[in-house]
Amino acid sequence: MRSPIFRPALLLLCPLLLAAQSLKDFEKRVTEFTLANGLHFIVFERHEAPVVSFHSYVNAGSVDDPSGETGIAHMFEHMAFKGTQTIGTKNYPLERKAMDEVEHIYDQYDAERNKGLKADPKKLADLQQQLKAAMEKADSYVIPNAYPELIEENGGVGMNAGTAEDATNYFYNFPRNRLELWFLLESQRFYDPVFREFYKERDVVREERRMRVESSPQGQLFEALLATAFEAHPYRNMPGGWASDIENFRLTEAIAFYKKYYVPANITIGIAGDVDPKECRRLADKYFSILPSGPLPSGPRTIEPPQKGEKRVEVESPAQPFMAIAYKRPNQNDKDDPVFDVLGEILAGERTGLLYTDLVRDKKIALAAAADPDSPGGKYPGLFLFFLVPNRGHTLEENEKACNDIIERVRTQKVTGDTLQRIKTKVRAGLIRRLDSNSGMADALTFYHVNYGDWRKLFTIIDDIDKVTPDDVVRVAKQYLVRETRTVVYTVQPPATANSTGKAEGAGQ
Amino acid sequence: MKIVIVSLLLCAALASAQTEVRHAIVLPSYKDLKYPPLPPLKVPEPVEATLSNGMKILLLEDHELPLVSGAALIRTGNLFDPPDKRGLAGLTGEVLRSGGTKTKTGDQLDQDLENVAASIESQIVETSGTLTFSCLKDNTDQVLGLFRDLLTTAEFRQDKVDLAKTQTRSAISRRNDDPDSIADREFSDIVYGRNTPYGWRVEYSDIDNIQRQDLINFYHRYYFPANITLEVYGDFSATELRAKLEQIFGSWKYTQPPVPSFPKVIEKVSPGVYLASKDDTTQTFFNVGELGGELRDKDYPALEVAAEILGGGFSSRLFRNVRTAHGWAYSISASWNANYDHPGTFVISGSTQSAHTVDTLKAVGEELEKIRAAEVTDEELQTAKDTVLNGFVFNFDRPSKTINRLLTYQYYGYPKDFIFQYQKAIAAVTKADVLRVAQKYFLPKNLTYVAVGNPKEFGAPLASLGIKVEPIDLTIPEPKPEAAQATAPTPATLAKGKELLQRVQQALGGADKLAAVKDLQYHAEVEAFTPGVSIKVKQTNSWIAPSTIRQDNELPVFKQSEYYDGKSGWLASVQGMRGLSPPLIKQIRGEAFRQLPGLMMSDRDADRTVNYAGDGLLDISSKDDESVRLIVDEKTGVPLKLAFQQGEGGTAVENVFSDWRDVDGIRLPFHWDVMQGDKKAAGVTVQNYKINSGLTPEVLGQKPATAPPGSPAVKP
């Protein structure tokens, strides 16, 4: 369903290796400009159909959540759909007063609560009642979901947003005659967001965590993996945040996050489709110049200390067992970044990756065996991740051993020139295939600009991949796929559910 | 006075600065924008033709990028699965690709295709089969050649059939891990009927029944030229490609009788509340709904609009109520899922905090009543229609969408301009229409509610919805064991049985030596595989012929022993000393029965039957209702496996022997794997055997010291 979501960068922002179409031809279709306030635009012309895709890339994500407020970046992302002073309200001045009153009472509530053992329970209960009433009053001025509804009824499709560790993305597609509407809506949501229904939405975000993490065996495993592999760096937190942090969000905290990180210089906008770049420039000036410039924020200062030994963690779950194995790796700007991508393909590419051919196809011990070379993000040193799902009748031990054997192989034996060639061909073809999607292009152009300094990296990364040699692969595998920096997390069934999978509960429920 | 006022104003100003990001300024309003009309839709027209062998083709040129893609659509589907071989179509679809062709294995195809960054994929779903390809323009000839080979001469090699079956079994074993998919599956199965091709599901026994020849037969029945339409789009010349396709496929002159129609959906209502308990979830995942209709129904457009207003997105009633206003759910939606050729489902689905399960389901009921009770507002109607109409252009933003649509319409017998009829019909929907269809089709008394969650955390019990709650049993049925299929003995089979058993005795050292075994003791290391983790147990097994037995097990944190002398016995564990319950007695008796020296001499025991049940199969049973099946290597006479039933549930177990060695003139196995179906439950490795060491019941029967009463039990 179309709702704001947060998405671990696992799948979406893995920098695909691309090449081929002549860069020179392509450059003719790309126009870039930066407003005085620092907001950067990349416009890609594609006139196949009268439609346009938009993608706003904010270079701040869950990795920037303050301590005790994990998930606040994601919370703001939800707020960015709540409208403005003119969109989403029946009476803004009254609404604002009511919202302030909510905060005022909440401050009193927190002050009483902070008295700890000396807090007066009667006073707390009383303040809670007041808070509830004040929230209802504020909510009474709201026209619910006015902002996204505007987008939908104007033919907006594919509307969504995602908060990952490194970045927050907002995107949708409009028919081309709604170009100006997009400029108006997007600029106003970032200029003048009103954090209405904040505490209701906090409950929704809490449900999202229940859905994605607490009720999902994969979610549970991934959360344990991150928290174990990373002891200090904020990559240790899932983008949605920890339950107790979510339950205690304050509106003022979300505002503070927005003010610090949503400065124009920290935002890059991609527009791809049936557009005239000059018209885009004019509209950008008209609508986005109003955003006040601000200093670029710094990223988290905490550096993950070197891992000094293997870590192993169990997660109890009635699900059929599966496991994740992660090794530490440098960030995306390391000179060996292309080698990691190639290594990922060697190990887990389609039907010829070694994990597939060995564990799934030949030994038949795995239902699935996959790898991700840069999880959960690329901006900071991260993980090279393996994911193993045993076949029925086979064990995690067998699969882990087979996976380790494969890793040992790539650490000691050079892959053939043919294998590398296949990967390079695939990467080149991948770029061509990407070019027929407006939304894919808007996404890619902004991503490469922010993470590598130039959208052209979308093409030049092919050259980097081409330069990777079999010796490079062995070298990088030897250096990084080592036991001391490995984290292994797997699920274990609690004793009661050994063979059967859940009996019927009694009637009367 | 003035000072006070000023400071009051200051306070007010400070207070109001809290929730506001910007002071009020006048921004342009979206209401003032004007939108020029979109250019008229340019819908490309694919070239349609039929090859000389009856295969239809659709071709569409697209020269934006040097790519060529295509798909063959085959009239088949898993609706044609035989009832005892469910999953056959799915396996056929999969192994068509993985099993390779006459000249290339699937693995070779994987390499060849990935070398040129191309792909060919195959699957069969409910009402169709597809074989798709995608390649760079330069590789079209090569890839089309491989595509043709797979379509016309798929080989279905045995190793890939086995792999696909193994993977399907694994998928079955994992089908209850995700509450969301449980809810979807159970809802669909109940609404369509669990015993119909639309609602049944694949079980282990189906997979066991399916053999390679079944796949080949299925493939031959449905994959023939007159039953296939091939679409291709991309960077080519249609005239040239048409000639090429005739050249490639024209000689494939294979015919079959026309394919029968798909079975019809049995229209019925199955109202009720169904609950599947799952305690590792903090939300309840639910699907509420009933059977729906087809895309060509006259009421479909109005139903689309009604479902959109009810639960189609941010602007919908369910979203606003359950998510925005109450915060009970992140995910909630309603949709009228119509199919092309058979009734779909009307379903309201989502997931809600466990404690608010009943609140949410009641809210769902309330919203249904509301939309049936009064017309929707003008605004709601307009928003729903605009969402479809203003986004209509996106149905045409890629040539592939046009050709896929045309192929689908042809396949299901829909008019070419169906999407434009739909557009007109949506524009004409009125508030009265929405009310009429809501009253006719959203029927509260027909609703099926499926909830998957933890009833202990529901807050209010599910029964407070006022409808009887039926539990859903999620247990995955195990396949029937071979050992259960006994053959009735005849004089001939009894004679053959005796003869085979005597050959086994020969192979194991001779009847006399075996008969001379009065007691046997072995020490073994047992590795027990509870799922995910293995436990090592030190075991001592002591047997005095014919039926006295003692087993001592030593685990890392506790010990357990059991003893039985043919009449009575005891069990000593961390819970203390107990007598043997009847099920335990049966279990221990079985262990005694299965001790090899005694078992091998069953032909000399008048209370036992030794029956020949087929090639290398000996069914040995006793008057006390003990029975095993001994699987023997007919050539050597050495036992391969021992199959029997264990426990109250009658779990099928097989001990698979290996490492036979000589011990004082007789041969005994030093290792066996304990198998439960495909699953290895344990591995037993014997360190040493002692024969005739003078064991006595007095010594074996000595109870070990147990923990004094009141001391804490050690958790195993």
Image (spheres, coloured by chain):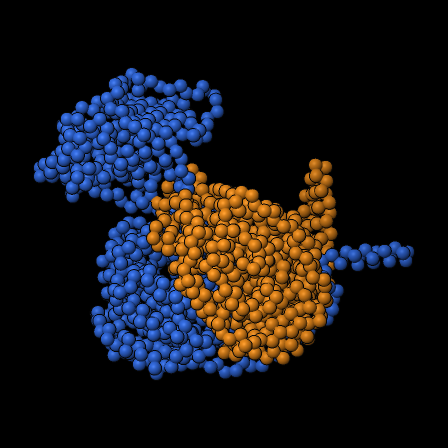
Chain colours: A orange, B blue
Please state, as top left, top right, bottom left or bottom right, where the C terminus of chain A lies in the image.
top left
Q: Nearer the viewer, residue A459 or A280?
A: A459
Q: Nearer the viewer, residue B595 or A160?
A: B595
Visible residue check, residue A375: yes
**Residue A51, above or below A360:** below
Q: Nearer the viewer, residue B540 or A464?
A: A464
Residue at 42%, 74% (x, y): give it: B67
Residue at 27%, 50% (x, y): give it: B208
Q: In this view, which residue lies farthest toward the top?
A: B698
| Residue A359 x, y percent position in the rendering | 38, 51
Query: Can you tell which quarter of the image residue A177 is in?
Result: bottom right
Q: Nearer the viewer, residue A160 or B293?
A: A160
| Residue A384 x, y percent position in the rendering | 51, 53
Residue at 56%, 43% (x, y): give it: A308
**Residue B53, above or below B150:** below
**Residue B698, above or below B395:** above
Determine whether, in the image, residue A71 is placed left or right of residue B715: right
| Residue A281 x, y percent position in the rendering | 65, 76
